[in-house]
Image (cartoon, helix red, strand yellow):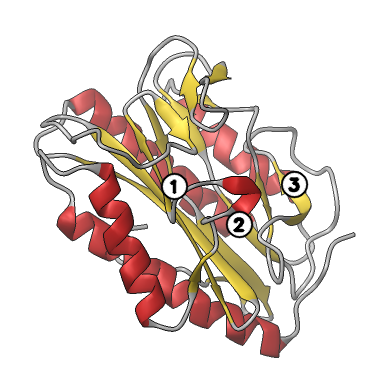
Amino acid sequence: MIKLKSGREIKLMREAGKIVAEVLEEMESTIKPGLTTAKLDKIAEKLIRSYGAEPAFLGYHNFPASICASINNEVVHGIPGLRRLEEGDIISIDVGVRLNGYHGDAAATFGVGEITPQAAKLIKTTKVSLQKAVEAMQAGNRLSDISHAVQAYVESNSLSVVRNYVGHGIGEDMHEEPQVPNFGTPGRGPVLKEGLVLAIEPMVNIGSWDVKVLDDQWTVVTADGSLSAHFEHTVALGNNGPEILTSSNLV
C-alpha cells in the first residue's frame, strides 16, 4: 500500500534530507586519492550523529556501515573498507538518515582527481536523468512516467539503465511501496498524488545493464566490468509540484 505523507511528515523528512545533503557535500569535499572508504564512512557517521540523527543503513539487514561506497564497476551497496581511492576512480556514495522517526535517502557519484571523458559523460548523464525523473513527478502523471523519463534520457546517450535495482517509496520506513523502476513504458502504474514521497535513484552503466552480486552478499557490480554511476534524491509531491528534500549543490 502506498502511504501518502502529511505536511507534518514531509517537514520531518525535509529535516532528515538536509542532513543527507550535508553529508554528501562533506563527502565531495573530502574525497581524494589515497583516502580509504572506511575513513569516508567514519566521517559520515560522525556528521550524522552530530545532528542527533542515526545512520539508517548501519545494521539495516545487517549492513555493516553508515554509507554505501561503490567504486568504478560497483553499482550499489559497496561496503566501506581499507580500499584506497586512486586517481581516475569514480565513487558512488549512498547516504541514509533517520531523524525523529523519518528517513532521508540520497546518492551521488564523484570523480577522484582527473577522470576520463567517458566517466565524466556517465556521471553527467546519470545526474541529468535524475533531474528528468523529478520533472516527471507531477500530480496526475503515472508512476511509469518517472521510469520512462530516466530510460529515455539514458538510452539517448548510448548508456544502459540497471534493471535489477529500483527506487522506492520512503517515510517512516526506509523502503516503502511503490517500487520505482528506472525503465518502462509511460502511462502505466499508480496515478501520482500530492503527499507521495519517493526515493528516485537511477543507476547507469557504460556497458550492459546486467549486474551480479559479489560473495559479500552486498556489493553489486556490472557483469561486464564497465563503469557505473548512481544518483538519488528523496522527492515529495506537493501542491506546487515535486520538491527535492535532499537538495544540495551536487545533485
Amino acid type, mark 1: Phe
Vertical relation: 93 (above or below) 66: above
Task: Locate residue 28: give its quadrant.
Answer: bottom left
Residue that appears at 52% across and 20% down = 215
User: Which mark is on residue 179?
Assistant: 3
Note whether residue 247 is visible. Answer: no
Which part of the image, by quadrant, shows the N terminus? bottom right
Note whether residue 125 is visible. Answer: yes
Task: Name the residue furthest right.
Answer: 1
User: Which mark is on residue 199?
Assistant: 2
* 72 and 2: which is toward the camera: 72
Find disc 1 in the rendering and name its residue.
231
Evaluate if marks 3 and 1 touch, with contact meaning CB atoms under 8 Å apart: no
Vertical relation: 187 (above or below) 29: above
Q: Position of residue 59 (x, y in %)?
A: 57, 54
Q: Position of residue 246 (x, y in %)?
A: 46, 68
Residue 19 placement, left or right of 121: right
Residue 91 placement, left or right of 218: left
